[in-house]
Image (cartoon, rainbow, N blue to C red):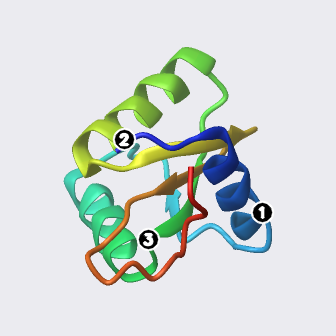
C-alpha cells in the first residue's frame, strides 16, 4: 500500500496528539517488542514508537526492521519517535482519497 502526500499529511495530523505506545529499551528490537508493535497496530492502526538510540545508522536499521517485519508504512520520523500506519480490515482510521 502506498500513501499519497495528502494521505501522509492527514496521518501526520492525526499522530500529532498521540503518545508513543511502544518504547524500545536497552535490549533493542526483540521479538517481544515486535509482537507488541504488531498488536498495537492491529488495535490502533496509527501508532508512535520511541526508538532510544543515539546512533543514526542503528536507529535507521531498527526503523527499517520494524517497517519490514510488521508490514506497516513509515509515516514520519522526528528525532527518536517513529510514526507508523497499517490499515486493518475494519479501517478505523479514515484516509482521504488520493
Instruction: Please tell me whether mark 2 sits on a helix, a strand or a loop.
Output: helix
Image vertical order of residue 87 relative to residue 76, above or below: below
At which x and y percent is residue 15? 69, 65
Q: Residues within 10 Å of mark 3 (few under 14, many from 20)?
A: some
Under tag 1, what secondary structure?
helix
Residue position marked by numbered label 1 in the rendering? 13
Q: Name the residue under label 2.
A: 67
Of 14 and 31, nearer the camera is 14
The first of marks 1 and 2 along the sequence is 1
The nearer-to-camera label among 3 and 2 is: 3
Residue 61 is drawn in which quadrant?
top left
* Helix, strand or loop at mark 3: loop
Residue 24: x, y in percent? 49, 53
- The residue at the point 42 percent across, 40 percent down is 2
Q: Which residue sits at x=77%, y=63%?
A: 13
Q: Which residue is drawn at 61% across and 63% down?
A: 96
Left or right, 10 with reference to 1: right
* First in sequence: mark 1 vs mark 3: 1
Instruction: Give the residue number, with chain letter if any, for mark 3.
Output: 45
Amino acid at each position: 500500500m502506498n500513501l499519497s502526500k495528502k494521505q501522509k499529511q492527514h496521518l501526520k495530523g492525526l499522530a500529532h496528539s498521540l503518545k508513543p505506545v511502544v518504547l524500545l529499551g536497552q535490549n533493542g528490537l526483540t521479538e517481544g517488542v515486535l509482537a507488541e508493535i504488531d498488536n498495537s497496530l492491529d488495535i490502533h492502526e496509527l501508532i508512535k514508537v520511541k526508538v532510544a538510540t543515539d546512533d543514526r545508522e542503528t536507529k535507521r536499521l531498527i526503523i527499517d526492521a520494524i517497517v519490514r517485519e510488521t508490514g506497516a508504512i513509515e509515516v514520519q520520523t522526528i528525532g527518536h519517535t517513529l510514526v507508523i500506519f497499517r490499515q486493518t480490515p475494519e479501517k478505523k482510521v479514515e484516509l482521504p482519497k488520493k
